[in-house]
Image (spheres, helix red, strand yellow):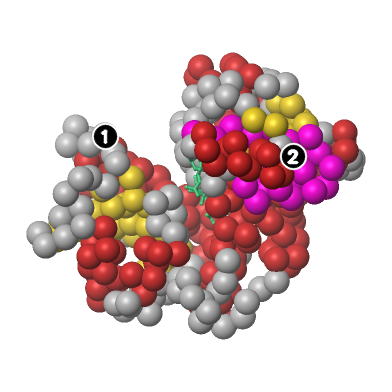
Amino acid sequence: MSFELLDQLAREGFEEMVALHDRRSGLRAFLAIHDSGPGRAFGGIRRWSYYDEEAALRDCMRLARAMTYKCALARIPAGGAKMVLLDRPELHVENAYRHLGEVVERLGGRYYAGPDVGTNSAELALVSERTRYVTDPGPDGPGELSESTAAGVVAGIAAALRHLDGGEEWSKRTIVVQGLGEVGSRVALTLRGYGARVLASELDFDRAELFAKQAGIERVDPTQELEMPCDVFSPCALGGILHDLSVLRLRCRVVAGAANNVLASPEHGEALHERGVLYVPDYAINSGALMRGSRFHLDGVREPLERIAARVGAVVEDILAQSREQGLSPACVAAREAEMLVERRCLER
Ligand code: NAD
């Protein structure tokens, strides 16, 4: 490792980092618990083919910390965690997820696992064979989570447009969605249904083709979506896409989407602000699934989509209003607000 892991954990306030290995399934994974102080930490399991272990570790830490911020802004009494499972040819996927279920069960409810990139209903069903502390994808669980995320993203986009122009005026809007997966496809469909012009990029050519035909959505080449002139660019694929070079290519007024850690680093939130692009912080807008899952785990309630959309919309409105009042970027305001809420919670304990 070329970075000092323990120093990094201390600097960023992590409770624990667990390295996992299972010889039988070929599993290699990390679990980062950033904050379980309120009694539990929520976070999905990401399965990805990382360049190396350090890349996996860094991703795990960034995602776990973002979950703490997400919980704080959504006023959920929980902290953040994340598991990353290193995808590689030797991995026996089914047994690896069952093994992760055993690890989660041993933690006794300190960590609740959920979906993330590479981990959807089929994988969660394997985890739930071994633990109660997972978002059950079946009829006994909280129901469709990506739908909740998509509803929140659409509500956040609406809040951003109202903030800029006083109304949504969907029929006059052009929106570019990057990634037509679980969340992006729903966001695209909803916005198209509202009458917006929707363009979308997707790496999976067949899926993009089919979707475009069925839904009346225009396709954009996945190397050109950033340059498309539009009202809103909605990143719903992977994180880290807004960096020194890509920020200069954007021709949108708003960036608002589901992708976690969309900024390569916090400075890029400032770069967007300086360029006059309204950035809706990822952990403010993509918390719909967390709201739905946590409410179910904590209170046994399946919160309706409209309620989730209203909650996300209110969080986004508040961040944008504070940003305008204080003359600070939304990224800066959201980080300060989340840190203040976490600090306050620590003092109350
Ligand atoms: P997904 O894997 O179902 O979909 C992602 C899609 O993006 C895939 O179809 C993939 O082919 C496409 N893609 C990847 N790179 C691309 C690129 N460069 N250009 C165009 N398309 C590209 O994932 P998802 O569940 O829809 O989640 C999308 C993002 O939202 C992820 O970053 C995830 O962490 C985040 N998120 C998801 C949820 C949820 O409820 N699913 C909740 C919070 C955050």
Q: Is mark 1 within 8 Å of ligand 1?
A: no
In front of the other: 270 or 94: 94
Q: Is residue 3 left or right of residue 164?
A: left
Query: Which residue is at a point 29% across and 39% down the rendered structure image?
Result: 50
In front of the other: 63 or 209: 209
| Residue indicated by mark 1 | 51
Looking at the rendered structure, the secondary structure element under dot 2 is: loop
x, y (%) of residue 86?
26, 48
- First in residue order: circle 2 vs circle 1: 1
| Residue indicated by mark 2 | 216
Query: Is 197 within the magenta?
Result: yes
Looking at the rendered structure, the secondary structure element under dot 1 is: loop
x, y (%) of residue 5?
23, 44
In front of the other: 295 or 148: 148
Amino acid type for the residue under numbered disc 2: Gly
Query: Which residue is at a point 51% across and 59% down the rendered structure image?
Result: 342
x, y (%) of residue 240?
46, 33
Q: Is residue 58 visible?
A: yes
| On screen, residue 270 above or below 136 | above
Mark 1, other Cα within 10 Å: few <14 / some 14–19 / many ≥20: few
In magenta, the rendered stretch is 185-203
Q: Is residue 63 left or right of residue 291?
A: left
Q: Of the residues tagged 2 and 1, which is closer to the observer?
A: 2
Total numbered labels placed on residues in the image: 2
